[in-house]
Amino acid sequence: MSSSTPVKREGLAVRAMIGFALVFMFAPVLTMIVFSFNDPGGRFNYALGSFSLEAWRHPFAVPQLGVAIRNSLVVAAVSALLAGLLGTPVGFALGRRKFLGRGAVSGLTFIPLATPEVVLGAGMLILFVATATIPLLKTLTGGLFYPLGFPSVIAAHTTLGLSFVIINVRSRVIGAGVTLEQAARDLGASGFTVFRTIWLPIILPGILSGALLTFAISLDDFVLTNFTAGGTTMFPTWLYGLMRRELPPQIAVVGTLIFLVSIGLVALAAKLLGRRTG
């Protein structure tokens, strides 16, 4: 009887800590949801007034809000697509092939994730400006990334998203499908057929999960966007400027919707990444 008492107390303590952590994590989100139904009676949605559904009926009534959301969605979608297309062959090669410097390349894929975004954003800004001032870089890029705009912010978000795709695809490839590939080649299957029928079903969850994570992160990324978007109206930077003048309840509505979309994308990515193919 005495031996079971410490186990019970430990279990309660762990549950209490988990509950506290969850409340601490989601308190801002829950507050935002509550204030999305608020009528503050002024320019700033900081104090609870009367209950109202007006912001939900007209979520894009704030000028430029719809443009900012549309631009961010376009950038997130293109960045996710490019990250999937560029990261897939790299992740596949790192997991399947042996070549000189593979360990170094594999380690380098983590650098964008480990580097503070302020440093990464400053580096991106210097690079994009350099493409307009250094003749060789200007020739290679065709002046695409300067002045700053859609191409530069897409390039920055794709760079960050590449790591997610590469890591996910690499983890799917390692130790998977080798026996099936050997059997298929023994039966005369071509390289394309082997990739299409064996490897693609294996790595597809990794590709989709990496792309979805890229989309979710790009949608609300502020630091890289602030450095690389230039005069393009993007939701995170537009919202930062708006908060100096006003904070209407529509922002809480859009924030709630973005949170729900992000949760759905992350959950879908986790499900795809955890899926096992037979």
Image: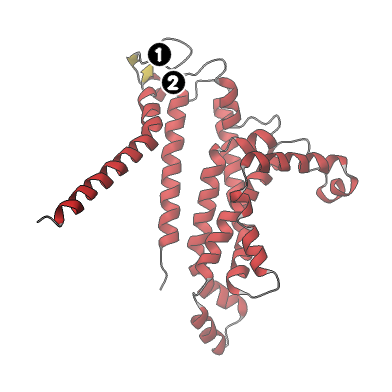
For the point 60% across and 29% down, which residue is it?
A: 237
Amino acid of disc 1: Pro
Relative to 48, say whether 226 is above or below. below
* Local SS, label 1: loop
The picture quadrant where one finds residue 7 is bottom left
Label pair 2/1, CB-CB below 8 angstroms:
yes
Q: Report whether residue 215 is seen.
A: yes
Q: What is the quadrant of the C terminus in the image?
A: bottom left
Residue at the extreme front: 2
Per the image, the residue denoted by label 2 is 249
Of residues 46 and 154, the one drawn nearer to the viewer in this rendering: 46
For the point 68% across and 74% down, which residue is it?
A: 99
Q: Report whether residue 63 is seen.
A: no
Per the image, the residue denoted by label 1 is 40
* Local SS, label 2: helix
Q: Which colour scheme is used?
A: secondary structure
